[in-house]
Amino acid sequence: EAQVTQNPRYLITVTGKKLTVTCSQNMNHEYMSWYRQDPGLGLRQIYYSMNVEVTDKGDVPEGYKVSRKEKRNFPLILESPSPNQTSLYFCASSLSRTIGTQYFGPGTRLTVL
Amino acid sequence: GNSVTQMEGPVTLSEEAFLTINCTYTATGYPSLFWYVQYPGEGLQLLLKATKADDKGSNKGFEATYRKETTSFHLEKGSVQVSDSAVYFCALSPFTGANSKLTFGKGITLSVRP
């Protein structure tokens, strides 16, 4: 089944404790992206990647890192999480940067205490 | 920059009622337009899309027409069902450029009563 998977689905952590949210897609998509969803703000892009080893900032990159060592994986890293990063996070992928239909993972609900 | 504006919610309808959710956009060039739906506890799913002016996207009884003259992409359904209860997001993506970033509206929650 073609899909985007994320892990964990739920995470409660404390301020400053490094964490990684994994994202994997099995559709051989070139383009991958991370969004955060906050009430009243919709979804905002954090980082994106056009292909392996090519990543760039989205609208709200502060406090996040990403890497793209393999085509299928695009982990989101929070080196020192803070409470304002409490949010619902979605990973998405699409065939290429010029094809706008993006496929979303199920989401990761993160709470930073 | 690009932006998407959706009507304020939430919206509550009775089953079989007619649905319209307004969406307008601001963008340079010729973006592609999308409606995504998020069912409770799930990720976003593409509902329909349109890639050029006057295109009509349709799926599961929902329709939306890309109106460049009014910069709108309103979502309609003739007869809603309880199973349509979800959050609906209008979004756009630039036709070209380095980033296929989707710019989303704030979303609107639809509740359908039996």
Image: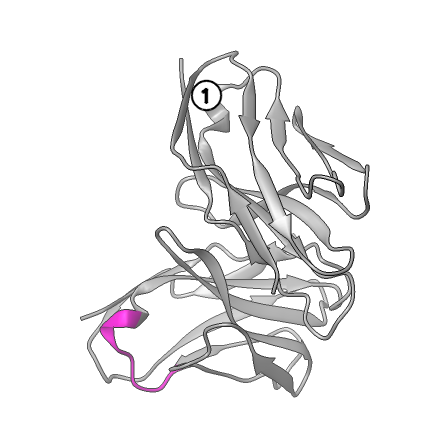
Residue toward you, A26 or B31:
B31
Total count of labels:
1
Q: Is residue B19 left or right of residue A63?
A: right
- For mark 1, what is the residue? B82
B112 falls in the magenta region: no
Q: Quadrant of residue A97?
A: bottom right
Q: Residue at x 75, y 40 (%)?
A: B69
Q: Quadrant of residue A112?
A: bottom left
Q: Residue at x 45, y 35 (%)?
A: B86
**Amino acid on which disc 1 is placed:** Val
Q: Is residue A90 left or right of residue A17?
A: right
Q: Residue at x 74, y 64 (%)?
A: A95
Residue A82, above or below B46: below
Percent of width and height locating residue A60: 45, 73
* Residue B39 visible in the snapshot: yes
* Residue A2 visible in the snapshot: no
Q: Is residue B19 left or right of residue A26?
A: left
Percent of width and height locating residue B57: 74, 36
Residue toward you, B51 or B53:
B53
Residue B67, above or below B12: below
Q: Which contiguous range is marked in magenta?
A: A78-84
Q: Is residue A10 left or right of residue B5?
A: left
Residue A23, above or below A3: below
Q: Chain of mark 1?
A: B
Residue toward you, B24 or A88:
B24
Q: Residue furthest front?
A: B69
Q: Residue at x 74, y 38 (%)?
A: B67
